[in-house]
Image (cartoon, helix red, strand yellow):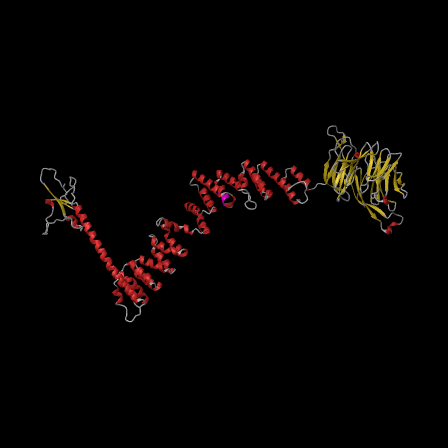
Amino acid sequence: MTVHEKFLALGTHYGKVYLLDVQGNITQKFDVSPVKINQISLDESGEHMGVCSEDGKVQVFGLYSAEEFHEMFDCPIKIVAVHPQFVRSHFKQFVTGGKKLLLYERSWMNRWKPSVLHEGEGNIRNIKWRGHLIAWANNMGVKILDMISKQRITNVPRDDISLRPDMYPCSLCWKDNLTLIIGWGNSVKICSVKERHASEMRDLPNRYVEIVFQFDTEFYVSGLAPLCDQLVILSYVKEISEKTEVECCARPRLDIVQPLPESCEEISSDALTVRGFQENECRDYHLEYSEGESLFYIISPRDVVVAKERDQDDHIDWLLEKKKYEEALMAAEISQKTIKKHKILDIGLAYINHLVEKGEYDLAARKCQKILGKNTELWEFEVYKFKEIGQLKAISRYLPRRDPVLKPLIYEMVLHEFLESDYEGFATLIKEWPGDLYNNTIIVQAVVDHLKKDPQNRTLLQTLAELYTYDQRYGRALEIYLTLRHKDVFQLIHKHNLFSSYLHKLFKRDHHKGQRYHEKQISLYAEYDRPNLLPFLRDSTHCPLEKALEICQQRNFVEETVYLLSRMGNSRSALKMIMEELQDVDKAIEFAKEQDDGELWEDLILYSIDKPPFITGLLNNIGTHVDPILLIHRIKEGMEIPNLRDSLVKILQDYNLQILLREGCKKILVADSLSLLKKMHRTQMKGVLVDEENICESCLSPILPSDASKSFSVVVFHCRHMFHRECLPVSNTVSSVQFCNICSAKHRGPGSAVLEMKK
């Protein structure tokens, strides 16, 4: 077989030549000879083919043209090689090898002219033509011919002459236009063709060959090819059978070696399984290669094996086969631009499945972050898979929370899993997850249902408070935090400005429940909410007045200080502060009215007497509380008082109004007195029950005698006190009206007798 970058040409034992595509499909067939094909040669263009067979036939023809050459020899032709540039008209040349090395050239009359290049050293068994150099092997060794000078430039003798050249043929391969690789027996040589210096030429060829690498192999060489700076060697292997202890053929080996000056380093080695390898010989194997794609073809009598340089896809295949998923994923990520067969996502999913099968659920869940990335469909698929195996908790910590965001149902499903079995884990997720990932109402209701079973569970209560906070129901959250006495309550108040719901709201609801915080509230109101300080001082009966006065004086809160001074009984100081600090006569008058203290009015008049605006205010308001004459007499002669006339008129109007009010009240009082008198008279005319349980208030014995037949006399007063007539003290007054001694002694008013009983 020979290889072109576009197709393969395969010759068989039955004289057929097949053209195959690189996948091994037959594209064309040629019937060349009834016996086996010995050699096929192609030019570089792949348009011309040379074929020789065991019956001595040689054909050179165009695959896409009618051009053709036929020649029959009287002996088998083992080898043929066409010029690499045969497609060009001035390079219509080819060589054949049998007992002679013949060169055929087409003349100007389209006739083929043969010429002998070499003979006399046995059969020629291999030829390789590259550029202007032809290398061939016969029984004695390897020769190289320079076609330009038509001179043979070297002879490389074979090392082991004991090996039959027909059974262990020579393998030749040009690495480039000047480097020839020779493999024969177990020996490998790498030869370099070099230009000879002009001073050394004399009668010598202008080129010479230098062996740059030479080493022996463990087995016999059946073929070789270059791979960068390394070699691919196809080896024929013999081994001793363990059963029969007889030498037998083993599977051929394909090795990659690194040539060294006198040895080699094995890079890799693979044993190939081909059909009938037990009966094959060294000559039955050949190695061809395609330079463009680094494909290597191992030809045996029954099989053609294609080998190619391992790439990252192959490496990943091997890693996956060995279940080294982590390394496979890493290799795919490094070579993601060059791999063709594998996808990073597919490897990652296989890795996750492998970890799940091994029971490493946490590691599998952690890998989901990196492998699934932003693919929401895959995330949701994996979550349901973890749910099926009861491992939702494992994946919960790694679920995406931002870019991407999964469906709310996914997060709710995980939260319900924790709520059923792990309150602490549930609380942790609520703290870590943003509140917009799930339907807050559904989760709140689920927590409320669980609290019905365990109403004092602090973890659930605290979590419920956080859920209320996410839902902006801060009042509910605050209530729970206060119930738990949790330190986060202050953070909640500051963050969401809930100062109106703190101590102030409690005080509005009940003035006494938070009494131990009233002292603290004074400073809080003074610092943050002064408008509510004075109402608090008026309504609280538990705040320390001295402390409150100190705080208000430090901050110069006049109104609050005035109130505290008056509440502490220091009304004169309070009034003085109103007059001096506020200079507000209306407030001063209002304060005096509230206190209803004559001395305060006197102080107010004395302070205002030299201030005309204050006098006007007093004249307008004093009439109903203090005699205006007291103020008017003290006004200095000649003082100008604003709106004096209007003030005097108002005083007179107020006086007339008072007279009218008094007369009206008097009439009402008289009518009420008469009505009450009549009612009292009716009440006193009613009878009073006297029985055995009543006693004499003087002698303390029963008021009624035990013997009802005896005569007795009893006096009963309207106050319900009763006396025996003989026990009642004699009155010293001339009036016949008697009064109850007991009520008179207690100053309860006269208790005149209402009834005297005699019998």
Q: Main secondary structure of the magenta part?
A: helix
656 and 319: which one is in front? 656
Whether 491 is drawn above or below 119: the answer is: below
Q: Is residue 384 among the parts visible in the rendering?
A: yes
Quarter of the image with the N terminus is top right
Quarter location, residue 700: top left
The quarter of the displayed image where residue 182 is located: top right
The residue closer to the viewer here, 319 or 447, is 447
**Relative to 600, does residue 330 appear above or below in the rendering?**
above
In the image, 488: left or right of 18? left
Name the spot of residue 727 as percent of width and height, x first.
Answer: 11, 45
- What is the number of callouts on the image? 0
Residue 714: x and y in percent read: 12, 43
The residue at the point 37 percent across, 58 percent down is 551
Residue 515, x across and y down, in percent: 36, 50
Name the spot of residue 217 as percent of width and height, x first: 77, 39
Along the horizontal axis of the image, is 317 left or right of 703? right
Up the image or down, 14 lies above or below 291; here it is above
Q: Is residue 211 magenta?
A: no
Q: Magenta residues?
A: 427-431
Asked whether residue 607 is in view, the answer is no
In the rendered structure, the answer to whether residue 334 lies left or right of residue 180 reads: left
